[in-house]
Amino acid sequence: MSETTSLLPAPGFRGMTSTNPALHIGRAYMESDPHQWVRELIVNSIQAGARRVDFTTDWQGVQNTGVYRRLVVDDGCGMSASQLESFYGAYGGSGRPVGETHDNFGVGAKSSLLPWNKYGMVLVSRRDGDESLVWLRYDDRTDTFGMRLFPTGEGQEAAVEPFDATNTELGVDFRALLPAWVEGSGTAVLLLGADPLENTVLGDVVSGRDQGSEKGVIDYIHRRFWDFPNGFTVTFCELPHDRDAWPRSTINGGTEPSVLRHHEVRGAQRNIIEATGNSRLVDSGTVTLSNEVTVHWFLGGKRRSNPVPPMHTNGFITVLYQSDNGAPPEMWDFTQSPYRYRRFGISEKEVRDRLFLVIEPPRFDPGKGKFGVYPNGARSQLLAAGSGFAGSKLPIPEWGEEFAASCPDAIVKALRSARDDETSSSSDYTWRNRLAEKFGERWPILRSVSDQTGKTTMLPTTEAIPFRSKKAPASPPTPDNGAGTKGSPVERQQKTASVGVITPTGRAPAKNRRVGGGLPDAVWVDEAEFDPGFLANWIPHDPNHPSGLIQLNRDHPVILEVIRTWQGRFPPHHEDEVGRIVLEVYQEVAVAQVAHTEHLRRVVSDSKIIDEQLRSSGALTTGLLGIVPEEEMISSRLSRRLGAKRRV
């Protein structure tokens, strides 16, 4: 253990003191994530140099009282009696030496455990062959947290030798908390809950923060930790899902119940790369964004029908961050939300389920002022600072837009493959031509245009032939040998530029420009792509649809009811055509709605409002459920194509 340097205050100075630690602890707990205590105990074990930390059940309490209490054990360096008192006798790290292996054991562990373990949490630690015990608890008379004092020959002490409490309401011999596999030093933490009869193996179920299931702890580890140090293992002794099947005693030679699953819980990186729950990885890589932000992407193959539990087998998007205090790289803002994937241009569920996006921004350095991220005080949220940011939310939507514009080829191909059976419209494109005449010139889209002075690159794909409305035909060529004349074929050829979707791997230099002539595409997809009740999604940055993509829910009950209603008004042999026309009308209305909102960019100061609010799934769904305009269009179109409808 390193020595602490004692610093005396300057003359005429008195430091601030905390009047009520319980208030600070309670506030920090409310601001932390559910299962934050799991993170704190794992990080503490790593900082203590442990090779293993085990989340298990105290079977003494089960046998003697029928209470299932959470017991967490590691084989780290342990703490002496004086260290236990120093670390747990104050809130805010008072007495914690700089650089000590347990320097994270303070605010984090206490604030995430004590609020739901008011009866107490008992720590037994072994260091240099000596074992010591402290009991932290809440005192309702003083409304604060502290250490329980035990009578000794020298008075009352907070840190004492472990003792036998089998005959008490706990039914635990604290001398036996450290198991046989902890051969040298180590620490055991026993969570007692709010009263002696509380089952704490399920976490904080009283307040409803935790899931009320051991799976919640396992899932939290998977979604919080990217990787663990070499030689460090997290193990978990999992009870059966059915509480009636929980064992009441240990068997198998007094070791542990045979119905338990004792397994290793791994970081997310190993699960992805080793692909235990999926087929092998198809491809992976890194996309560099602005401000030195990188996105590591991993694309798995087709999913197996029965992935091996417990682990994340579905894709996710997360932000990677590693602190300086010895903690392993951790994942923040973890999500599997379809909405977040759509921000990154990924709309198909089949691709979402096997695509992992890990965003790694730089850490904020106050001395440089450049863009970076840092955690808030409760370690529950990353914030952005520098380059115009000041304690701001992470600019994830902007990162998504950049990634979609530079979407790797492997992901683009996977999206195209998943859309093999989708069509953006029927074979009759009359309605799209009609909309293009009205709105095409007002719908600018971002494209890479070939330019030898450009700083980006592109893969040439199409030509930037401006949309020309039928109402404004080109001027006929004038007799000037066809050279340099306004409207002449030569001039039009000279103004034609190669255009491609923005990509970081192209060969031709280019500049990003907004060109006219685009309309968003609209496709019908399965209900799995939508939150319950929604009819439409807007994907502004789809790599295969540069003008944007509208997903429409072909299984929505309103759509099915409209189709059935109109099919009943025509002869049965027209059922397919009626269904096709109904879907076509809703596509046209959806595209028109999005095109109309483009006008608002002139009056809305924040353009994000258009994509995030006016084109949100809720806004588009509400607009499409208007019924009246769709009914008029369907009636007119069916009458034109199929003749008079039946009398009803």
Image (spheres, rainbow, N blue to C red):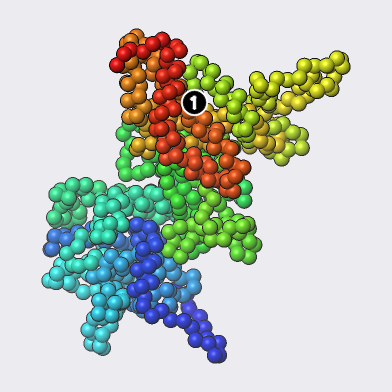
Q: Residues within 10 Å of mark 1 (few under 14, many from 20)?
A: some
In this rendering, is residue 501 above or below 576?
Answer: below
Q: Look at mark 1 in the image and give the residue it sits on.
A: 588
Element assignment for label 1: helix
Q: Quadrant of the N terminus?
A: bottom left
Q: Nearer the viewer, residue 485 or 137?
A: 485
In this rendering, is residue 13 above or below 271?
Answer: below
In this rendering, is residue 117 above or below 229?
Answer: below
Q: Nearer the viewer, residue 215 or 56?
A: 215
Q: Outermost residue, bottom direction?
A: 12
Res 632 quadrant in image: top left
What residue is at 59 percent from the left and 42 percent from the top? 601
Q: Quadrant of the C terminus?
A: top left
- In the displayed structure, does residue 454 sit left or right of residue 232? right
Q: Outermost residue, front direction?
A: 647
Res 199 quadrant in image: bottom left
What residue is at 54 percent from the left and 18 percent from the top? 430
Residue 87 image offset from top left, x and y in percent: 38, 74
